[in-house]
Image (cartoon, rainbow, N blue to C red):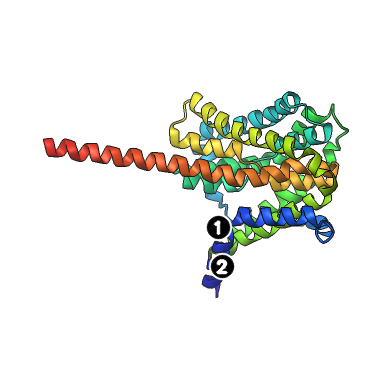
Amino acid sequence: MLEKLGKFVAFMNKYFTLWIVLGAVAAYFDPAPFKPLSKYVSYCIMAVMLSMGLTVSVKDFQLVFSRPKDVGWGIVLRYLIMPFVALALTKILGLPPVLAVGMILVGCCPSGVASNVMTFLAKGDVALSVTVSSVNTLLAPLITPFMFTLLAGSIIEIDTWGILKDILKIVLIPVGLGITIRYFFSTFVDKITPIIPIVSLIAIFVTTSSGFALSADSFASVAWIAFVAVVLHNLTGLSVGYLAARAVGMPNYKAKAISFEIGMENGGLAMALAIAHLAPLAFIPAAIFNLVHNITGPAVATFWRSRLEKQQAEAAMAENTSLKKG
């Protein structure tokens, strides 16, 4: 039974972006059925965070002590690059205040859980990716509210403590619960691991479609500029993240991990916080980011993987040629 369910989940997850896009389009053209789903957004993100916790073991944090420099750079670069890139883009593009705060909120949120998968596909340092995303997520209650207040507080009034409490409730508690369950019931968790991704799919579908429904009336007037801003934010994060990691001395495979940790955001958390604390339209950057990074992430990962495999094939061919000549 679990095997069949696992295959179904794998099929659904393969077309993850398609289902999310279809939900967003349906919600935009017929918002009424989707608007009531907004009251479940926080619970959906809690479910995603619980799922993340179930995939994280205590061993994943060993790198904090065995490779503190790598993990430290991953954390510092994560919270330096994306918030300030978001702020710069809001100024350069002259975004309306409601979109500007939405963009900045996305930049201040921790790494997205998909970053680990993208690092694996790109043949990067998966252990580093898992550790950095886990630590960044655990630090989010301390960093995200205050970073957001610092950068967006001059645009709107921000309930810093309300956001902090929501992140504790939505992120820290579910992740901690998931890690605890995995620690004490690892055999059971291993059995259900293949079906865990469906939780994220359903949660992001509900979150995205309800957000588009709430902002449907105003979306058309800001869609183009919001899309441009989000794409630039995402691509800048991926590229600057990689270059910054290389600049501090990381080899290629580690830099790939840091690139995804910086360029792929926890859009679901940003959506939940935007719906709870900001105007409906502020949700749009997070919603678009959630779609965009699920397209750019796999594309970049595939490119890096193909390039590495080509280099390995060329090296093997050169070695064989050298041996034959010898």
**Residue nearest the viewer, comparing 57 with 222:** 222
Residue 81 screen position, x and y as percent: 64, 29
Q: Tag on residue 8?
A: 2
Query: Which residue is the extreme one toward the right?
Result: 157
In the displayed structure, 143 sits above or below 57; it is above
Looking at the picture, tell me which residue is in the foreground, 168 or 88.
88
On the image, which quarter does residue 103 sit in?
A: top right
Q: Residue at x 71, y 28 (%)?
A: 89
Can residue 226 be seen in the rendering of this structure? yes
Observer-nearest residue: 165 or 119?
119
Q: Is residue 122 left or right of residue 93?
A: left
SS at circle 1: helix
Indicate the quadrant where residue 174 lies: bottom right
Q: For mark 1, what is the residue? A: 14
Mark 2 and mark 1: Cα distance apart in space: 10 Å
Q: Quadrant of the N terminus?
A: bottom right
Front residue of 87 and 292: 292
Mark 2 nearby-residue class (10 Å; few <14, some 14–19, many ≥20): some
**In x, y percent, where is residue 120?**
48, 47
Residue that protrudes farthest toward the left in the picture: 326
Which numbered disc covers residue 64?
Answer: none
Going by the numbered disc 2, the residue's amino acid type is Phe
